[in-house]
Amino acid sequence: MPDHFRMFADYNRWANDRLYEACATLSDAEFRADKGAFFRSAAGTLNHLLVADRIWLKRFTGQGSAPTSLDAPLYETFADLRAARAIEDQRIIDWVDTLSEADLAATISYSPVSMPGKVELPLGPLLSHVFNHQTHHRGQVHTIFTALGHPSLTLDLVYFLLGDGKRWQ
């Protein structure tokens, strides 16, 4: 199972790279345009993904910053956000590379940002949530991108496996 999560960490970086490359073609106005997504714009959604990853990695590792709001503004410029995303993706990969079966079965306890109380679940399903959350919001940015009249993106896992991710076959 650790290799399954290593594959997803690698795919996550690949998909984020492709999405940020596409967003680099947007004007600043397009990047910040409120298109009705949960976090309003591509900028808001990509910022949220970075916020969420930092929160989760703080829970998992005890290291790094953890914003206290799911829409905390982290970076003003696309370039700064993109650089931070690349660093966070590498941080995820490096940490996932250390995981064992026992680590994935261990219970994690945390208090959610969005609701009071305490949650205790095994790391494996929580890590699945982190990667699924990324995919969910990348899909929202993809919709924003195409709603702005830009070409559709190919972010499917199968295309990763057929290209950069061949080592996971």
Image (cartoon, rainbow, N blue to C red):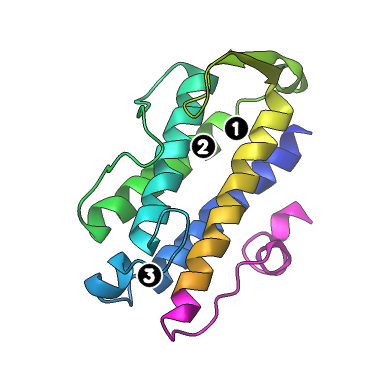
Q: Which residue is mark 2?
A: 92
Please provide percent x and percent y for residue 47. 36, 49
Would you say residue 104 is visible in this rendering? yes
Q: Is residue 167 within the magenta segment?
A: yes
What's the amino acid at mark 1? Val
Please provide percent x and percent y for residue 38. 47, 54
Q: Earlier in the sequence, mark 1 or mark 3?
A: 3
Crowding around mark 2 (Cα neighbors within 10 Å: few <14, some 14 to 19, many 20+) is some
What's the amino acid at mark 3? Cys
Q: Which residue is mark 3?
A: 23
* The N terminus lies in quadrant: top right
Please provide percent x and percent y for residue 163. 66, 68
Magenta highlight range? 145-169
What's the amino acid at mark 2? Ile
Q: Circle 3 — which element? A: helix
Residue 132 to residue 145: above or below: above
Please provide percent x and percent y for residue 116. 52, 18
Q: Is residue 106 left or right of residue 76?
A: right
Real-space Cα separation, disc 1 to disc 2, in angstroms:
6 Å
Mark in the foreground, 3 or 2:
3
Would you say residue 9 is visible in this rendering? no
Residue nearer the viewer, 159 or 30: 30
Q: Which residue is mark 1?
A: 96
